[in-house]
């Protein structure tokens, strides 16, 4: 253990930072669309059950491994397995994955930043033109926006855990929550908004198919930032007095509440713009929703609140998404930063510089892979499709390796580190944990059905995505 390891200053700071990681573009845009398409209230209920009964134990286990070892994934796996080569490799995957996910998440954040700049400079109308987004992703200005976002992330991360990550979360998370509520209130006053609310909440059980169940679980898993080494790393920054299980519950609750509230913002907005909308036709990823459909919805407000008013609402919305993206981005880049600091004895500054030169280059490759540079735009082919570099990174790391990491973690904690050690760790900071129902449930689920389910998702994704 490094004597000088920094810690979050309070439990609240830790919860906000972890919630900042969990609340991201996935909650604000991905979840509402998924829920709308896949059974509304029925999806919501299933999602909430998955969050609390399947994902929460994994979240708690990640935090416990981090706090016990005071290390990031590589150091954590190694030190709890007596330096096993296999588990060291699993830990390495736990650092490589966030490194690669950061690459494409950064690109989306850069696009959002670019949209904010466009709207602030009076160009909301331009964003509504057909093919605008297709051309925007080839715009040379993106390099400038990339530099700007990189500087913001760097300023937060170089300041460290307490003064950087925690302070940013303490400012951005409350701001985000207030902005989200204000947006909901505004959207609900629009004509036809309640048709969207109805659509979001009324359960349609007939839409629930095995693939919907699979996507609800994947959405829950990703939304809580599991399998990315983030919660191991953040767990290593909490003190032994912190109640891990109780904190994790609050993080999961916040994340789910934000996803739910985002549904009350996005769907009524869509219905008020087009009362005859067919949500089945919305794209799954949410990317075309934020960058293509939403600008049109905001622009349509011009007739009631004028161009400046419509632009103000649009900037407000994109800033909200930007805040969510920044706190997620910071958390994911902290994993390789922590790896370089803990395992390679870099200073934070040097670690960030190393990442800028490695992940930064890959980010540029992803940025130019939507039409700017042919080589990266047609990077490789599988399952009969030619894919840009950006999509390959998403398919491999986000969709596929994440569940594998989740599976490895469950096996590691239950069978290598051992359940009684986990219980011991979780009892610190929570005297009533030992012997509780929660303890029994966590130990049982992590050693049986949770790894089985995430392994199934991994195999299913490999089989459907790549062949
Ligand atoms: N939980 C995030 C979301 O819902 C996912 C994420 C976290 C992605 C951290 C990247 C980094 O969007």
Image (cartoon, rainbow, N blue to C red):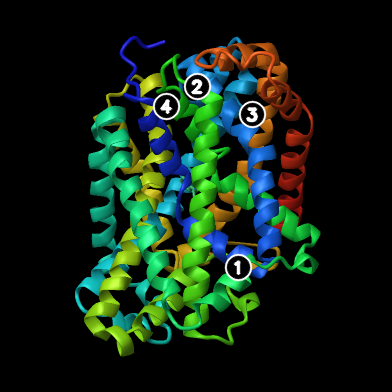
- SS of the residue under disc 3: helix
Tag 1–tag 3 contact (CB < 8 Å): no
Q: Which is in the foreground here, disc 1 or disc 3?
A: 1
Question: Residue beneath label 1, please?
Answer: 200
- Looking at the image, tell me whether mark 4 or mark 3 is earlier in sequence order: 4
| Mark count | 4
Q: Which is in the foreground here, disc 1 or disc 4?
A: 1
- SS of the residue under disc 1: helix
- Looking at the image, tell me whether mark 2 or mark 3 is earlier in sequence order: 2
Quadrant where the image shows the C terminus: bottom right
| Mark 2 vs mark 3, CA separation in Å | 20 Å
Q: Which is in the foreground here, disc 4 or disc 3?
A: 3
| Mark 1 vs mark 3, CA separation in Å | 34 Å
Q: Is residue 467 visible?
A: no
> Residue 82 location in percent, x, y?
60, 9
Q: Please determine whether, in this image, residue 180 is positioned above or below residue 297.
A: above
| Mark 2 vs mark 4, CA separation in Å | 25 Å
Q: Residue at x 39, y 20 (%)?
A: 342
Q: Is residue 369 left or right of residue 306?
A: right
- Mark 4, ligand 1, within 8 Å: the answer is no
Question: Residue beneath label 3, please?
Answer: 409
Q: What label does residue 339 carry, if any?
A: 4
- Mark 2, ligand 1, within 8 Å: the answer is no
| Mark 2 vs mark 1, CA separation in Å | 35 Å
How dense is the environment of label 2, judged by Cα within 10 Å: few (below 14), some, or many (20 and up)?
some
The one of 270 and 461 positioned closer to us in this rendering: 270
Question: Residue beneath label 2, please?
Answer: 243
- Looking at the image, tell me whether mark 1 or mark 3 is earlier in sequence order: 1
Q: Which is in the foreground here, disc 2 or disc 4?
A: 2
> Residue 157 location in percent, x, y?
29, 36
């Amino acid at each position: 253990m490094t004597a000088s390891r920094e810690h979050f200053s309070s439990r609240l700071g830790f919860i906000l930072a972890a919630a900042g990681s969990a609340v991201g573009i996935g909650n604000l845009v991905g979840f509402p669309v998924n829920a709308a398409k896949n059974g509304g209230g029925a999806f919501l209920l299933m999602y909430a059950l998955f969050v609390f009964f399947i994902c929460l134990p994994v979240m708690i286990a990640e935090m416990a491994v981090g706090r016990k070892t005071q290390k990031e994934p590589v150091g954590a796996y190694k030190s709890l397995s007596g330096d096993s080569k296999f588990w060291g490799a699993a830990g390495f995957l736990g650092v490589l994955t966030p490194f690669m996910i950061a690459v494409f998440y950064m690109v989306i954040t850069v696009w959002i930043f670019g949209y904010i700049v466009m709207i602030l400079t009076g160009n909301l109308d331009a964003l509504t033109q057909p093919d605008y987004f297709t051309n925007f992703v080839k715009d040379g200005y993106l390099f400038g926006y990339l530099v700007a976002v990189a500087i913001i992330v760097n300023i937060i991360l170089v300041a460290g855990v307490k003064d950087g990550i925690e302070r940013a979360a303490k400012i951005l998370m409350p701001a985000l929550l207030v902005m989200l509520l204000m947006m909901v209130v505004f959207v609900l006053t629009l004509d036809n908004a309640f048709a969207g609310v109805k659509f979001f909440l009324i359960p349609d059980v007939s839409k629930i198919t095995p693939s919907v169940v699979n996507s609800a679980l994947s959405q829950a898993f990703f939304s809580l930032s599991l399998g990315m080494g983030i919660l191991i790393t953040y767990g290593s920054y909490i003190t032994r007095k912190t109640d891990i299980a109780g904190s994790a519950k609050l993080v999961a609750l916040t994340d789910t509440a934000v996803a739910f509230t985002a549904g009350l913002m996005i769907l009524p907005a869509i219905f008020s713009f087009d009362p005859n909308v067919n949500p089945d036709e919305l794209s799954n990823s949410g990317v075309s929703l934020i960058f293509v459909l939403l600008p049109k919805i905001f622009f349509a407000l011009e007739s009631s609140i004028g161009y400046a008013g419509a632009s103000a609402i649009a900037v407000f919305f994109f800033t909200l998404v930007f805040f969510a993206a920044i706190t997620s981005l910071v958390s994911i880049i902290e994993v390789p930063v922590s790896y370089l600091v803990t395992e390679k004895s870099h200073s934070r500054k040097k670690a960030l510089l190393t990442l800028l030169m490695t992940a930064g280059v890959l980010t540029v490759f992803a940025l130019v892979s939507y039409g700017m540079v042919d080589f990266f735009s047609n990077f490789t082919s599988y399952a009969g499709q030619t894919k840009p570099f950006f999509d390959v990174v998403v398919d491999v790391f986000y969709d596929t390796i994440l569940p594998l990491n989740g599976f490895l973690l469950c096996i590691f904690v239950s069978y290598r580190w051992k359940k009684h050690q986990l219980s011991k760790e979780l009892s610190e900071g929570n005297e009533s944990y030992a012997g509780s129902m929660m303890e029994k449930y966590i130990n049982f689920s992590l050693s049986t059905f949770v790894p089985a389910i995430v392994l199934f998702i991994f195999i299913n994704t490999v089989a459907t995505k790549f062949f």
